[in-house]
Image (spheres, helix red, strand yellow):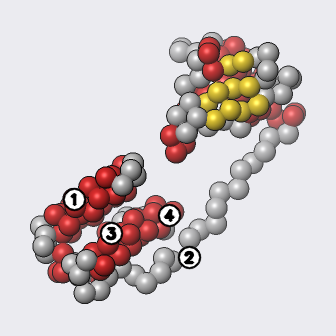
Amino acid sequence: MKLQTALRQYIALKQSLGFRFRSDAVILCAFAKAMGSVDLRRVRPARVRIYLDGRGPLTRFWERKWVTLRGFYRYALARGLVGQSPLPMSAPKMPPAFVPYIYSSAQLRGLLAAMASAPSRSLTEATWRTLILLLYGAGLRISEALNLSDPDVDLSTGVLTIRCSKFFKTRSVPIAPRL
């Protein structure tokens, strides 16, 4: 069986089970493209490692690709499509997770003061100020803050409704009266 055919069947199975499987499908399609038109049993560990390593330093995306491919090869092994997985047995040690920097009140005031004198063609000073305070005070992601609309803000109860946030969920975020 061709690699592309097996990957299409695996993606269809996952999606039929109710998984979104969009980012995993993109990873698997990129893998198929990197391997070329090859029989599933002829995929070599050295070529898989080249795909996983990509260009540049080791990142969390390496692990994401590895986990996605591991799921596919478990599927292939369970169905007898391959005799063994060409994947490395384990993922290498990943770089440490990002540690966020928390601004002090004085630093935040300085940032807001700097925004007053920063030229902007597209956003007003009030918009920048609101955006920065939302990101800092409510802990929103930039996309969440930019996608807020009037019905999502309830100042009487102090709650923001964040729609279709990460992992496609809707969540409520409390905000302090000061914010």
Three-letter amino acid code at the position of disc 4: Thr
The residues tagged by marks 1 and 3 sit, at their Cα atoms, a distance apart of: 11 Å
Do residues under tags 4 and 1 come within 8 Å of each other at their CB atoms?
no
Mark 4 vs 1, N-terminal side: 1
Do residues under tags 1 and 3 come within 8 Å of each other at their CB atoms?
no
The picture places residue 63, in percent across and down from the top left corner, at 47, 67
* SS label for mark 3: helix
Mark 2 vs 1, N-terminal side: 1
Mark 4 vs 3, N-terminal side: 4
Q: Residue at x 59, y 23 (%)?
A: 148
Q: Which residue is mark 4?
A: 59
Mark 1 vs 3, N-terminal side: 1
- Relative placement, left or right, of 115 versus 23 is right
Decide: few, some or many residues near mark 4? Use Cα within 10 Å; few <14, some 14-19, many ≥20: some
Q: Which residue is mark 1?
A: 8
The residues tagged by marks 4 and 2 sit, at their Cα atoms, a distance apart of: 10 Å
* SS label for mark 4: loop
Three-letter amino acid code at the position of disc 2: Lys
Q: Which residue is mark 3?
A: 72
Residue sticking out furthest to the bottom: 83
* SS label for mark 1: helix
Instruction: Evaluate whether residue 61 shows in this view.
Output: yes
Dividing the image into 4 quarters, which one contains the N terminus?
Answer: bottom left
- Relative placement, left or right, of 60 versus 3 is right
Q: Residue at x 21, y 59 (%)?
A: 8
Q: Which residue is mark 2?
A: 93
Relative depth, front residue between 99 and 150: 150
